[in-house]
Amino acid sequence: MRRAWRVIAIFVVAVLASWLALLFWAAQTDWRSPLAPVTERAFHGNEFHAVFGTGAAHGSHLHVDSAGEDFSALQSTAPAQLAAADFSILRYRFKHFPRTLELSLLFRTAENPGDVQTIALPWPGAGVSSFDLSRVATWRGTIIELGFAEFATAQNVPPELGFKPFDVVGVKLWPPSWRGDLGALATDWFSAWPWSQRSVHALGREGEAPHSRSAVLFAALAAVVAIGWAIVLLGLRGRRLLLVTITCAALAWLALDLRWQAGLVQRLLATRTLYAGVAWPQRARIVGDSDIEQAADELKARLLGKTAPTRILVDAGSRFEMLRLVWHLLPLNVGELVQAVPLGVALPDDCLIVFLDSDAWQSDPAIRTLLAHSQRVKASGAALANGFDSSRLVAFRYRHAH
């Protein structure tokens, strides 16, 4: 019996030690680094000043009262003699940071003073967050400016509704250490990231920006390690090994599912901040692209009149703007111009062709030929004041050649 318990104890220790090694691997920690940072560069919030928006020092904090004209805010400080190679771990803390804002780190170097670098950071929450700057290729040379930029969550929050006052508590820069690397790993895996097109199924950080190794890969390797030690130390075979394999796989799946659920809850809390207490008709009007929504409203109210055209075809400066304009014009008979022109579709007379932030009606030869006999829609009064018949939004009534 004692021998059995001894083997089990050895198995537990081996599994835990292996998982710890995997954590260091995921955090990309150098084993030669110290346990804790031997030095640091600290900046209190009141050492920053508001570049865009307004802010004032409240004790050791910087209280940011308002955003700039474009609904974004920027705070900056100028550190002295800060070598990027010596400090790779960023530790930052904010107070009352709204869930409707995204956060980015900004910095400039003495080697490229005219080039401002930006790095997206996770939502800071109420505690201290960490980020590993060693994975950022541009974090090199001598840092001459360090700052934070805040702006409404892209494509989800109307810029005019995103900002709420908050405090910059402080920033610390650490050299590599076990504590710093593991802290950056925890922030990367468990902090809140804003909604995106992949948010329904993504775990943690998304996109191509620098980040730690995948939590999914870590969970898979952790399960494989536990199964391997069960074979080597416990001598499991056959049905017992199958049972342990199923158990490990289920536990890994459960851990990842809990992580996914936690990220979803964070995003739902951000949504609740924006929509809670608002009546349903008003909720429908709270969109991240309110300027495109207003363009669609004006198009329907001022240009279409009481009788809508048989067809509306739209083109825009970007794919996102085009799809969102189509969305806001529904349930009208609306589609994309780029889908019709290459196919040589015979367009009906009086269909409306709309260009939003696009000069294709002037620069694209195929579209110029298409519109050769069409009539440009002229707006007046309130429609003209809201930007119609301008470089932002231009509309044509299609006419066949006769």
Image (cartoon, rainbow, N blue to C red):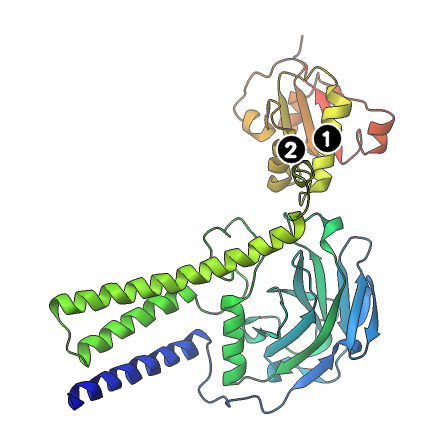
Q: Residues within 10 Å of mark 2 (few under 14, many from 20)?
A: some
Question: Which residue is at 13% across, 66% downward?
Answer: 239
Label 1 near label 2: C-beta < 8 Å?
yes
Choose between 227 and 137: the one closer to the eye: 227
Quadrant location, the N terminus: bottom left
- Identify residue for label 1: 297
Question: Which residue is at 73% across, 40% downward?
Answer: 291
x and y percentages locating residue 290 in the rendered image: 71, 41
Of the two numbered discs 2 and 1 on the same chain, state the one appearing first in sequence: 1
In the image, is residue 356 above or below residue 216?
Answer: above
In the image, is residue 318 above or below residue 192?
Answer: above
- Identify residue for label 2: 328
What amino acid is at disc 1?
Asp
Question: Which residue is at 26% across, 65% downward?
Answer: 247
x and y percentages locating residue 320 in the rendered image: 61, 41
In the image, is residue 367 above or below residue 288?
Answer: above
> Would residue 96 be visible to someone looking at this image?
yes
Q: Is residue 12 left or right of residue 83?
A: left
Q: Is residue 25 left or right of residue 175?
A: left
Q: Determine which quarter of the picture holds residue 338.
A: top right
Element at label 1: helix
Question: Which residue is at 70% across, 16% downward?
Answer: 373
